[in-house]
Image (cartoon, helix red, strand yellow):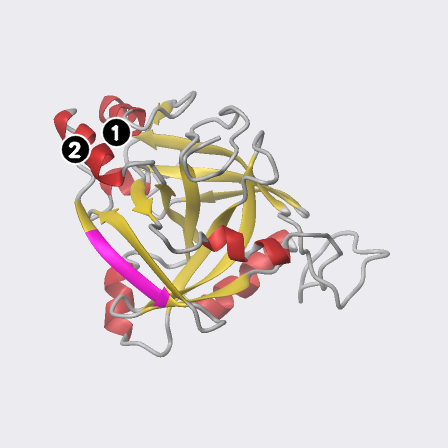
Amino acid sequence: MRADGRTVVGEAVAGVPGTFDHLVVAVPDLAAGVAEFEQLTRVRSVPGGSHPGRGTANHLVPMVPRGWGAESLTYLEILGPDPEQDSALAARSLPGVTGICAQRWAVRPDDLDGTVQAADAAGVDYGSVFDMARSTPDGGRLEWRLTRRAPLAFGGAQPFLIDWGTSPHPADTLREHSSGRTAPAVPAGASGDFSGESTSSVVTEPAVTLDALEFFGPDQTGLTAAIGTLAAARTVVAEASEPGFRAVLSTPRGELTITSVRSAEGV
């Protein structure tokens, strides 16, 4: 059991360290992106909140990496422009996002500052540490610290670090949405066999499983070293002309692969 109380059953997922925290999927329009994700997966997300000064807001989806216990709930974040904020802020936070894409991913070390220092000593730049906060739909407040680099290192394939401090982890607030399972409403335009499924119920268990994170880029040694500082298991970086990564998910509609915005054609 980790210091944060999560139980990790080994590190069975390719490219995913035991400190994995969450996956960020970016979209150019939040409402449309949420609807598209539901159509692709038959999984509904839960409203998260707005990021003041960043121009973005999010929805959250319960998720568990394959091989981890169900009690080790993580989440997938759908991140898009906040219509209540200046669109120029969102453009800076979501550069190059023209469709649904895997933007970046986070790890939660037991000691964020110590991990940054160790990475610096190893020649790996995780950027600066920033304080962040947002309100939750129930009127609560989340506060956390994270590392940030601009532009994203290795096309988002190098993770950022996050520390939730004394705030409840967002996945904990999703547990009430992951205590059981019913069939989702049939999304408009969706195909497939929905026979026998309710048209008014939703998926309420962690119906999304993270099967793998796959990395690629021209600097295979550099990216391997950057991820290796976090002791990721079975990390393999494929050769490609541009850096990036893809997330392979299992969903009620089958396997779904979401690739980063800077992915190279033909990778």
Q: How many marks?
A: 2
State whether the magenta stretch is mostly helix, strand or loop: strand
What residue is shown at x 75% (from left), y 56% (from top)?
182
Q: 97 or 116, which is in the foreground?
A: 116
Q: Judge whether 190 appears above or below 219 on screen.
A: below
Q: What percent of the width, then of the height, locates residue 180?
A: 72, 52
Q: Residues within 10 Å of mark 1 (few under 14, many from 20)?
A: many
Q: What percent of the width, then of the height, locates residue 161?
A: 30, 42
Q: 25 or 2, which is in the foreground?
A: 2
Q: What percent of the width, then of the height, locates residue 7?
A: 52, 33
What residue is shown at x 81% (from left), y 58% (from top)?
197
First along the sequence among labels 1 and 2? 2
Looking at the image, is mark 1 or mark 2 nearer the viewer? Answer: 2
41 horizontally vs 87: left or right: right
| 160 part of magenta stretch | no
84 horizontally vs 210: left or right: left
Q: Which mark is residue 226?
A: 1
Residues in magenta, as a range: 130-134
Residue furthest bottom in the image: 84
Q: 150 or 22, which is in the foreground?
A: 22
Give SS at disc 2.
Answer: helix
159 horizontally vs 117: left or right: right
Note whether residue 150 is visible.
no
Residue furthest right in the image: 196
- Residue 68 location, quadrant: top right
CA–CA distance in space, label 1 to label 2: 13 Å
Give SS at disc 1.
Answer: helix
Q: Quickly name the residue at label 2.
A: 117
- Residue 109 location, quadrant: top left
Identified by mark 2, the residue type is: Gln
Q: What percent of the width, then of the height, locates residue 214?
A: 43, 31
Q: Residues within 10 Å of mark 2 (few under 14, many from 20)?
A: some
